[in-house]
Image (cartoon, grey):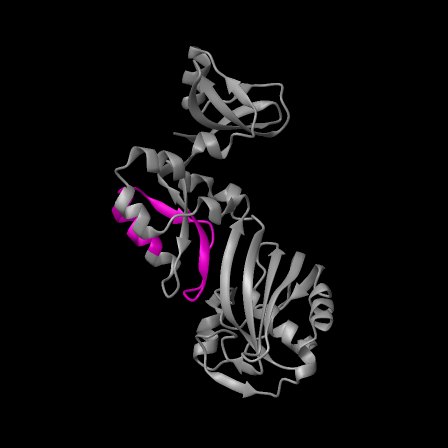
Amino acid sequence: MDGIIIINKPKNCTSHDIVRKAKKIFHEKVGHTGTLDPMATGVLPLLIGKGTLCSKYLVNHDKIYDVTLTLGVKTDTADTEGTMIGKKEVPQTIFQKENIEEILKSFLGKQEQIPPMYSAIKVKGKKLYEYARKGQTIEIQPRQIEIYKIKLLQMEEEQKQIQFRVACSKGTYMRSLCEDIAQRLGTIGYMSGLNRVQVGDFNMEVAVSMDQLEKNIQDTKFVEQHFITLEKLFQERQRINLEDRELKLFLNGVKLTQKLKDENYRIYHNDIFIGIGIVENQLLKRDIVK
C-alpha cells in the first residue's frame, strides 16, 4: 500500500510509537510529517510505502491546534512533563473575556518566537533538550512564525485555565506561545493540554485510532474509506497522459519535453495512474512512481 492514513494520536505515546505499530500492521515503510509531543493528541498523518516519498510536499503544512493554558505556574519544560520552577498569583481580573480576547488578538500576524529549551532544534550539533537535561544554558535564536487565527474557546476560572484555538505556520511552538500569552496577561503559565485538529487539509473527520486501524485492516471498505492514495493526494494537479514509448523513457529516468508550467503533475498511461512527475524548464522528469 502506498499513500497516507490519518491517525488520531492518543495521549501518553510518542509519534515513534505510532510509526512502529503501523509498520507491524502494514508491513511497509512508514514515516510521518512532523512529531506530536507524547502529551499531545490529534491529527498525525502517517506516510505508508511510497507515500514516504511525499514528505517533501507535506512538511511545510500549516496547522490548527486546540490549546489549554494553565496560569499561575511555570515548569522547566513549559508543559505538564516538567518540574514546577515558579508560582505566581492569578488575579480574578485576568479572567475578563474582553481582556483575554484582546491579548490573544495581539499575537496575530508574523512575528519572532523563541523556541522552548526542551525542543529538538539543533544548536552546534546538539539538540536543545540535550543541553537542558545537563543544566546547560545556550543562546536560542528566535524563529519567524505566523499566527493566522486565534480564538478563545473557554475560560475555567477555578482551574485557572484558558482554552483557545490557533491556526499557525509550521514551526510554531505552542509551549512558547502559552508562556508568552501568560506573560502578557501579567502572570506565568504552561501548556497543560494540546490537541492538533488539522494539518494542511488533513483533519479529525478522516482520522482513525490505531485500535480501529488494527481491527479493520483486512476490511477493504474501511481501508478505501480512510486510506489516501497517491492519486487522491495529488487529485488537484493536472494530468499528463503518456504513450507507450514515452512511458518507457519516463520510467527509465529520461526527461521528456512538455510545454507546461513548472510544477508537479499526475502521470497516466491508458488511463492508469503511474505516479507523479515534475516539469522544470519544459522538461518532465519522474518523481514518484507507484
Q: Which residues are magenta?
A: 18-45
Give 37 or 201, whichever is nearer the viewer: 201
Which image quadrant: the C terminus? top left
Give 36 or 10, whichever is nearer the viewer: 10
- Residue 23 locus on image (x, y percent): 29, 47
The reply to whether residue 32 is visible in this rendering is: yes
The reply to whether residue 1 is visible in this rendering is: no
Measuring 61% from the left and 88% from the top, which residue is drawn there? 89
- Residue 12 locus on image (x, y percent): 37, 66
Give 211 or 233, whichever is nearer the viewer: 211
Residue projecting furthest to the top: 244
Which image quadrant: the N terminus? top left
- Residue 185 locus on image (x, y percent): 68, 77
Lateral position of residue 23 relative to residue 123, left or right: left
Is 74 covered by the magenta stretch?
A: no
- Residue 262 locus on image (x, y percent): 62, 29
Measuring 45% from the left and 29% from the top, which residue is drawn there? 231
Number of marks drawn: 0
Lateral position of residue 197 relative to residue 169, left or right: left
Lateral position of residue 154 relative to residue 245, left or right: right
The quarter holding residue 260 reads top right
Lateral position of residue 169 relative to residue 231, left or right: right
Give 181 or 124, whichever is nearer the viewer: 181
